[in-house]
Amino acid sequence: MTPAARRRHAPPREEVLAAAMETIAERGLDGLTMAGLGRQVGMSSGHLLYYFHTKDELLLRTLEWSEGRLGAERGALLSRQAPVRERLMAYVDLYVPDGPRDPHWTLWLEVWNRSQNADEDARARQAAIEGAWHRDLVALLAEGVSRGELRPLDPDRQAARLRALLDGFSVHVAVGIPGTGRAQVLDHVGEFLAESLLP
C-alpha cells in the first residue's frame, strides 16, 4: 500500500493516541502491543509501525498529545483574572494525579523509566514538555511577587523546588502508596504554599 493510501485508511491520529494512552494506563507499556492497538483502532500493526516505528516513539507521541491537551487547560486556568494563590492551587490541582494509574501520570512513569536509554531527541522532547510546566509556574510566581501576593523570592528556584515536591507526591499517588492519596497531597501542598510563599 502506498503512503497516500495508508493515510486515507488510517483512523484519526487522536483516536490512535487516546487508545494507546488507555491501554498503557491499564496495562503499562509492556502490555501494549502494536497488534492489539491495531485491532482496537481498526488498523494493522504494520501501519502503526509505519507511523510510529517503535513502542517508545508511540509512548512519547502519546505523552506529547496528552500534554498538549493539558497545556491548553493549564493556559486557560492561569490566564484567568483571579488571585495568584487561587491560580497556583489550580496549577497544583491539574498537576497532581486523580489517583492510582492516572492515565497521564502512567505515561510519565513509563517515559521516565525509559529515559536512561533514550536518545538525545527523545530527551529533548521530554525536557520541552517539562519546561512548559516550569515556565508557566515561574511566570505565575513572578507575578505573585510583583503584586505583593507572595513573599519576595526567586521564582525560578522556588518553581524548581515546588515541582520536585509535586513530582514526589504525584508518583506516590499514581502508584497507590498508602497514606498519600490525592486529598492528603493537596492538603500537604496547600500547607507548604501557605508556609513558604504567602506573606
Image (cartoon, rainbow, N blue to C red):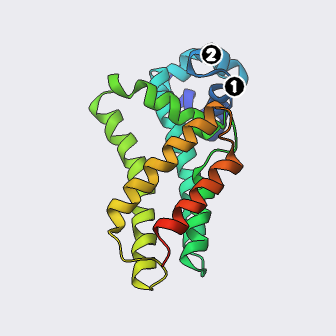
Which numbered disc covers residue 26? 1
Q: Position of residue 78 (x, y in %)?
A: 55, 70
Q: Is residue 11 above or below residue 125?
A: above
Q: Quadrant of residue 145?
A: bottom left
Residue drawn 45% across and 56% down? Answer: 162
Identify which residue, 95 or 125, lies in the foreground. 95
- The image quarter containing residue 134 is bottom left
- 32 or 48: nearer the eye? 32
Amino acid type assigned to the residue bearing label 1 in the image: Glu
Bin the neighbour count of mark 1 within 10 Å (Cα to Cα): few under 14, some 14-19, many 20 and up. Answer: some
Is 163 above or below relative to 198? above
Please state which amino acid type lies under the numbered disc 2: Gly
Can you tell which quarter of the image residue 9 is in? Answer: top right
The answer to whether residue 169 is above or below residue 39 is below
Q: Secondary structure at mark 2?
A: helix
Residue 7 location (% of width, % of height): 56, 32
Q: Earlier in the sequence, mark 2 or mark 1?
A: 1
Q: CA distance from mark 2 to mark 1?
A: 8 Å
Residue 2: image location, x then y, percent:
50, 23
Residue 110: mark in rendering: none
Residue 13 visible, this orientation: no
> CB of mark 2 within 8 Å of CB of mark 1?
yes
Q: Which residue is mark 2?
A: 31
